[in-house]
Image (tube, helix red, strand yellow):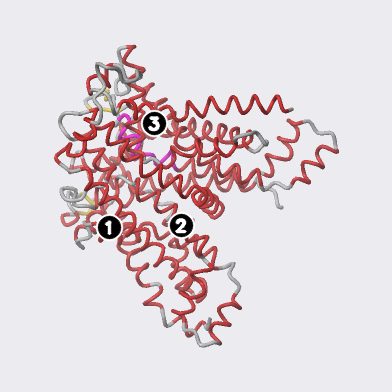
Amino acid sequence: MNKRQLSKYFPIFVLPTIAAFGIGFIYPFLHGIYLSFCSFKTTSDAAWVGVDNYIDALGDRSFLYSFWFTAAFTVVSVTLINLLAFAVAYVLTSGIRGANAFRTVFFMPNLIGGVILGYIWQLIFNGILQSYGTNIKLNSTFGFWGLVILLCWQQIGYMMIIYISGLNSIPESLYEAAKVDGATKWQTLRKVTLPMMMPSITICTFLTLTNSFKLFDQNLALTAGEPGLQVGGETIYQTEMLALNIYNTFYQNANTRGVGQAKAVLFFLLVAVIGLVQLYLTRKKEVQQ
Amino acid sequence: MSKKKTLATAIMSVISVLYVTPIFIVLMNSFKLKTAISSSPFSLPDKTNFVGLENYTRGMTFGEYPFYKSVVFSLIITVLSTVGILLFTSMAAWYIVRVDNRLCRGIYYLCVFSMIVPFQMVMYTLSKTADTLSLNNPLGIAVVYLGFGAGLAVFMFSGFVKSIPLEIEEAANIDGCGPIRTFFGIVLPIMKPTLISVCILETMWIWNDYLLPYLVLDIKKYRTIPIHIQYLNGSYGQVDLGAIMALIVLSIIPIVIFYFTCQKHIIKGIMAGAVKG
């Protein structure tokens, strides 16, 4: 295609996407950054307050609490999901019978939405916990592990698919060479499989990391942040993750919307930094093929 | 060796059964009396608490909102948004890669950038913008999804366009095809694998999405399935577990059908998305 001829077609080919992108992303994003420096209840009454919102956000104990809760949750769930997904993928690619059927089963929960997943598991956890006279919304330890189990159930299948395709793409000749050299199974796994799997590991840790850190629907449905604990006159919701904390700052009290927007900007920066650092660290370990 | 493999199959079978148990428990409870669901959620329905399809009939109108409407709106929104994203972003991606000037590269990097921005960052301003522009209906939300979902789609399509040899398009040009005919007649059919991948990823996202439609849509009129389920549990006075179990089962059924008819494509779509991601 002739470049000059094609470039005249900008309004047909690119304009619809760019217009929607402007409405759905660019304008809200820039406006959001501006509003994080304002005090506002609606978008029309915004008054500039400088960095006050950021000071308030960083001094908000519930925000800091939800940060640590989210961080702990992310570390545990990223580790568990990736270990289990890798293990399942490893077993399913070892030539066992019924591998396709197992793959089908493990992947299925992934297609169910977060809200519905939350209520499915609420029924199950509460069914177990009621014989001990408690429920998922009364105890933050159960809430934490409930969320971990829920996310594992949802995401192991997805990561397993990526690990399976990674394992299948390792050339057989490498395994043969390892065998000739007399490597044990464990040595082959560590010295051949794992290095060759680094691209898949990079993607899966990136996806699980950002998914866990940004978790919202499942959190809202399973525990809604409960239980709440009174600390020095304010209520800290003990299973409230960052996204839910930001949401509540916006919509439970219209007076704190500026703070909510400042939290959202901080949240965005955190997600971006964590994602990029993780990509940098695991990419370094990838081997050239 | 084969003994080990038989053992592995046995262990995996047990885990598989455990894996589908939560769904089975919900299914089982959807036929039980609502008081029996909370008192003994793990027992099979028996003579005293089996209610047949009563929960389902009650669920149909539970929450003063007919459930079929949620299904219809979920379907309309998912189809409209996905088709919009596929059509417009594939066109944009082709143009961006082929023209490749400074503006195009700028748009491309903006798209990549948008992929790491969490929804909370734009949720308030986006919902206000959508309100101002009267995009709070199923057709309007397709525009919002095109905008917020453009990043990943443009990124995946661009990656694929780069691998299409230019000669094919040049030949079409010499034969007198304009850009529009070249795109729809030649480029689009070649893109089919990526179209399917993007289609699967966007469908899964939009069908299950809760917060964006909840904030953007006029929820008095339009409730998607996740919005309706959340409303029944969270905001609607008395929680009727029987009706909720029935509705959960009904919302999983379309997903299961979708899964078993397009499983191959779904798996491929995820692998393609992962490589590019």
Q: Is residue A50 visible?
A: no
Q: What's the magenta bit mostly, secondary-structure-wise?
A: helix
Residue in the image at 61% along x and 73% along y: B165
Q: Quadrant of residue B60?
A: top left
Res B141 label: 1
Disc 3 residue type (three-letter):
Ile
Disc 2 residue type (three-letter):
Val
Taking the magenta stretch, the answer to whether it contains residue A222 is: yes
Residue annotated with mark 2: B198
In this view of the protein, which residue sits in the foreground, A40 or A95? A95
Neighbourhood count class around disc 1 (C-alpha, 10 Å): few under 14, some 14–19, many 20 upward: many
Residue B182 sits above or below residue B270 on the image: below
**Mark 3 near mark 1, Cβ–Cβ under 8 Å?**
no
- Segment colored magenta: A211-223
Where disc 2 sits, the SS reads: helix
Residue annotated with mark 3: B23
- Answer with mark 3 or mark 1, whichever residue precedes in sequence: 3
Where disc 1 sits, the SS reads: helix
In this view of the protein, which residue sits in the foreground, A181 or A110? A110
Where does residue B266 sit, x and y in percent of width and height? 49, 49
Disc 1 residue type (three-letter):
Ile
Residue B87 relative to residue B69: left or right = right
Quadrant in which the N terminus of chain B is drawn = top right
Res B202 label: none
